Amino acid sequence: MESPEAFNYQQQVEEIRLAMGCDFVALALVQTEERHFQIRWEFASGNLSQRFRRIVLHSGKGVAGIVFKTGKPIFVPDAHQYYKKEDMYNYPILIAEELECFAAIPLFKHNRVRGILLAGCRKHKCMSIEKFELLQSLVTPTFGPYYSEEVTGI
């Protein structure tokens, strides 16, 4: 089994940001059951500050929590169109990094979501469906010990 130290997440996050031409790319990892499956943003590239590190989410909360709960990617080409201004506090990564649009995909390990990879832009409508597909292709078939699609028995 590959240890987390063997894969350079920070380098991969930086390479994805450059390949996509995005302002911000981050990886959130799901903590163990003993830590109540907390979700924390661990690695980032293009960040404005270190505020992202203080964000702790649970299933169903924030961008990472929704991706974790559903196991489905999210594509939001215009955050202000999708989320009401008064609800933005529920999405702290968008506020902390001033993201206007983003895409987030789940990363699986043993058929459970164990990570969330987010790519976003600070410019209005900069995230296209092509960039979303590029993000998915950059982590296919694997991203360190994780993979981008849930494996089914079919």
Image: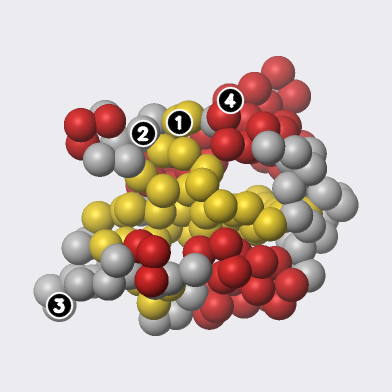
Q: How far across and how far down the image is residue 109, in percent? A: 27, 62
Q: Nearer the viewer, residue 51 or 85?
A: 51
- Residue at label 2? 38
Secondary structure beneath dot 2 equals: loop
Q: Quadrant of the N terminus?
A: bottom left
Please tell me which of labels 4 and 2 falls first in the chain: 2
- Assess disc 1: are there few (<14), some (14-19) or many (≥20) residues with their C-alpha within 10 Å of its C-alpha: many
2 and 3 marks in contact (CB < 8 Å): no
User: Splitting the image into 4 quarters, where does residue 103 fall?
Assistant: bottom right
Which residue is labeled 4 in the image?
90
SS state under label 4: helix
* Residue name at image x 12 percent, y 74 percent: 153
In this view, the residue farthest toward the right is 123
Amino acid under disc 3? Ile
**Do labels 2 and 1 touch, CB within 8 Å?**
yes
Q: Secondary structure at mark 1?
A: strand
Query: Which of the marked residues, 4 or 1, is nearer the chain's N terminus?
Result: 1
Give whichever of discs 2 and 1 has the lower sequence position: 2
Q: Which residue is mark 3?
A: 154
- The residue tagged 1 is 57
Front position among marks 1 and 3: 1
Say what amino acid the circle numbered 1 marks: Leu
